[in-house]
Amino acid sequence: MTDPSEKELAEFRAEVSAWMKDNKPADPGFLLPQTFMEVGSEQVLEFLREWQHKIWSAGYLGMAWPKEYGGRGVAPIFQKIADREMKRQAVPICFNVIGLSWTGPLINDIGSEEQKKKYLKGILNAEDVWCQGFSEPDHGSDLGNAQCRAVRDGDDYVINGTKIWTTMGNYAKHMILLARTSNEEGARKYDGLSFFLAPMHVDGIDPRPIQKLTGDYGFCETFFTDARIPASCIMGEEGQGWKIAMKTLQYERGAEAGAAGGLMAVRTVMGDLLADLRELKRDGKPLLEDPLVRDELVQLIMEEKAITLGERRQAHAALNSDYPFSIALSNKLRLSEFGRRMRKYAVQLQGGHGSLYVGDDDAISGGFWQRAYFNSFSSTIGGGTSQVQANIVGERILGLPKD
């Protein structure tokens, strides 16, 4: 594959920009999610499913994935351009994130030909929603201690146990499932885990939605009671689940390439915050004239710029030789924590109005920042809590001892 010329890239940028402008959906009249973790109704699901299918049909999703599996087979730079235009024009999100960004890249990378043909196109065109069955209620971030059991019985595995934080589990057709197939005495706990591309629409699987502080839904607790799934659903061999799960988490945490693209979240930036602050006043004067506020905002702007430059630096190996993969492995931690602090500050600056929420007539910006702040906690938990991510940075990048 030859590298595209600057002329080709410029022409494509103009093409996708015009398409997004002409096809951006009108306001549907109901609240759209800021991330895929807030898809909590059939109405929202169908709206976003139609939108993702439309983007894919136009050729602007999964552009670097092979043609035979629903992609376009072009250089990844084209997808990056399309993604930037989606973000710039603030179109709705592509909601099937677990499929587009984690499961799809995994199957593309290590899946069999049969699995690629069976699953990849459905991920892109939004026909097949995916969820993730990793975390469990009793084990928190100790993923290696998962106790959901999968017992081989003829041509099936029988699943029993519970998973939690299964985003969109009540709408999903498939789940990436980590389950224990062996519990031999004296063996490492990681060696008894296996990885499944499990169907959700079978007897014995019961996803129950969880209402969040925001009033939204999106997460589920999923119960398995003698649920039978085909043995062919296993990925790799029995006992290889931990290795495959860790590879999946590399995609989830942004340390591996291969995602299908699309706008994954309404990513609030400092420019958005500054625009909303221009109308606010304190003691009769514009808030942005307060020297303390200006100093704090500049600190946040500098931090945001550093994150952006770090992401650009990540693409150049020569600039990462001191601590290889340091930016990729720390990216999730830095982004999620910065987003939480920035949104919290946006609420604090509203003074008494900060206590208002979506639906209150006097809420500033319709309560956008309050909702964004509450929702920001999910990103500090999903994909590994901030505490776990800090451990990863300390141990794998800085070489600090585990204890």
Image: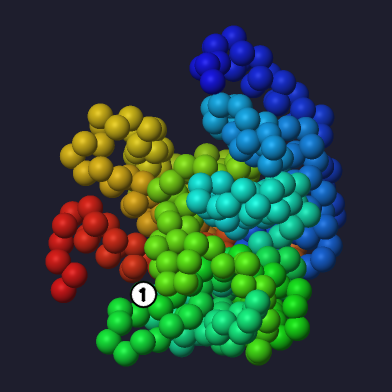
Q: Residues within 10 Å of mark 1 (few under 14, many from 20)?
A: some
- Quarter in which the C terminus is drawn: bottom left
Nearer-the-camera pick, 199 or 249: 199
Task: Say which quarter of the image contains residue 167.
Answer: bottom right
Query: Is residue 114 rendered to the left or right of residue 181?
Result: right
Q: Horizontal and vertical percent for residue 174? A: 68, 66
- Quarter in which the N terminus is drawn: top right
Q: Can the viewer see residue 348 in this picture? A: no
Q: Horizontal and vertical percent for residue 246? A: 41, 61
Q: How is the image coloured?
A: rainbow
- Establish if 242 lies above or below 332: below
- Establish if 385 lies above or below 314: below
For disc 1, the marked residue is: 190
Nearer-the-camera pick, 158 or 253: 158
- Establish if 334 lies above or below 161: above
Task: Say which quarter of the image contains residue 71.
Answer: top right
User: At 61% from the left edge and 38% from the top edge, which residue is drawn?
Assistant: 65
Q: Horizontal and vertical percent for residue 322? A: 18, 39
Q: Can the viewer see residue 252 in this picture? A: yes
User: At 78% from the left edge and 60% from the top edge, which residue is drawn?
Assistant: 45
Which type of secondary structure does the marked residue at label 1 adopt? helix
Query: Is residue 126 rendered to the left or right of residue 271?
Result: right
Furthest toward the front, the residue is 154
User: At 80% from the left edge and 41% from the top edge, which residue is drawn?
Assistant: 54
- Establish if 196 lies above or below 253: below
User: At 60% from the left edge and 43% from the top edge, which residue is drawn?
Assistant: 260
Q: Amino acid at mark 1?
A: Tyr
Q: Horizontal and vertical percent for residue 330? A: 33, 52
Task: Say which quarter of the image contains residue 36.
Answer: bottom right
